[in-house]
Amino acid sequence: MSIILDHVNHIYEEDTAMAFPALTDINLVIPDGQFIGLIGHTGSGKSTLVQHLNGLLKPTSGAIYYNGADINDEDYNKKELRSKVGLVFQYPEHQLFEIDVFSDVCFGPKNLGLSKKEVELRAYAALKQVGIEDEYFYQSPFDLSGGQKRRVAIAGVLAMKPEVLILDEPTAGLDPKGRDEILDQIAKLREETGMTVILVSHSMEDVAKYVDRIIVMNKSRILYDDEPREVFKHYKELEEVGLAAPQITYIMQALKQKGLSVDTDITTIDEAKNAILSAIRSK
Amino acid sequence: MLRDITLGQYYQTDSVIHRLDPRVKLVATLIFIISLFLVDNFIGYAVAALFLFMVIKLSKVPFKFMVRGMKAIVFLLLIAVVFNLFFTPGEVVFSVWKIKVTKEGIYLAAFMAIRLVFLIMGSSVMTLTTTPNQLTDGLEKLLSPLKKVKVPVHEISMMMSIALRFIPILLEETDKIMKAQIARGADFESGNLIKKAKSLVPLLVPLFISAFRRANDLATAMEARCYRGGDFRTKMKPLIYQKRDRLAYLVCWGYLLLCIVIGKILF
């Protein structure tokens, strides 16, 4: 069970003067349960790529397989696909429309044609998963704070019980606290449900702590596709394409140059702390 | 999805038509529209077609973009053609059941279709080669004599330019919200009319909210820069006629004269 992309190309406004390749020869295998960070700066094609995964966009050429079936086949059930591959857009709070939080979250499962009871059970569970308290359930979604709105919007997708959850820049426009809360929640969620999570971001810092695989995109192509520590080894090349490795990578590199024997592959602050301490002690 | 609507969408390229003064283009569009109603024979339309074709070629905008705007009026076109075809009295060519198709009807339907298509194409050329800002600048300048009779020309043109500016933004926003709701299993296509109308709620509510938010932000931004209407405002790029503009005027008036001659005098 997995998502496979086979030589996927996508060109916007094909056959016009504004023709623009958004994806060029993308080949990927995304196995079940992986936590993936999809990184690239603005316009690198990452949003276009994720919209292909649930069939919102059709590749200009190439094929995408979900659990072994070509999702762009005529008779493929796109609606079912979209319930399995949940996509949370950038600024998802802009899609809220119902009179209260609870009915908004019900929208997704209701569209799947489930019974009223099942719909409400799922909505309740989803709201709990993102940490929205009961007291907010019957408030207008427009009265909530920015971070809460975003959680409600994420719950709206979670309520469809997707097997794959894709989040397009879930932390954009949030303050550091809101950002950490959302990311921690997503990590927790993934641990509990074991679903595949794809986190789209332009910040290495955000994803380094959580993901087991990083896909770096640049100018419509995949530049790196590896474990975080392997990707961060290319921190100089990353800078050239307008990205950066996490601060920790730079600190470790600098310490190493100063003669401290530390492991430069470290990606999180906790690991770094331990490594620095043990390096100093062994001196 | 919604990118079919070309009206108010500028096509970026460099051509003679793009560089013309927006006033010339506005007047020329008006002349073209008037000419379409002046002529009523095929030679006249052939001249109009030639004129339009020439302008399109000069503008370097791919022909595809002109046709794209047409999709929006297909329905209107169909109604106009059908009504003219079947309900014009005159010499009967053939009849099916109670419906009679007359010679006059065929002519009228054909002319009506040509007129509508040329009308849309002509105005598309203008909007495709002129940025909304230029367009309203030109309009403001053209209408400025009306200021004497207390018409708030500047305010009207400002509102227009803002409205035009917002069309592509709102289209993009609609596209985005639509996709987001489709990702949540929404279905905008199937079902009967009532179901379809209902399915628009998840699209329209967020769209309205975002439009109000944007309008609010814009008002704040304008106020923060001390915007206060038309009086005493000067332009960074005032419109000044160049040689090519005068030449273009000449061509347009010549064209109109030709149309009058063909339409009214010769035939």
Image: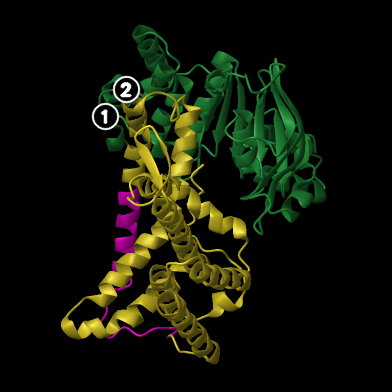
Residue at the left extreme? Answer: B150
Does A160 sit above or below residue A18? Answer: above
Q: Is residue B228 visible?
A: no
Which secondary structure, mark 1?
Answer: loop
Question: Of A189 and B178, which appears nearest the observer?
Answer: B178
- Circle 2 residues within 10 Å: few <14, some 14–19, many ≥20: many
Residue B259 sits inside the magenta stretch: no
Amino acid carrying mark 2 in the image: Ser
Which residue corresponds to mark 1? A99
**Mark 1 in CB contact with mark 2 (< 8 angstroms):** yes
Does B32 sit above or below residue A154? Answer: below
Which region is colored magenta? B211-238
Point 68% across, 32% down: residue: A271
Point 36% across, 76% down: residue: B139
- Colour chain A is painted in: green
Question: Of B218 and A74, which appears nearest the observer?
Answer: A74
Q: Chain of mark 2?
A: A
Residue at the bottom extreme? Answer: B243
| B63 left or right of B238 in image | right
Point 46% across, 26% down: residue: B184
Amino acid carrying mark 1 in the image: Ile
Which one of the lettered chains is coloured yellow? Answer: B
Which residue corresponds to mark 2? A103
Q: In the rendering, at what x and y percent does residue A99 appear?
A: 26, 29
Question: Of B210 and B124, which appears nearest the observer?
Answer: B124
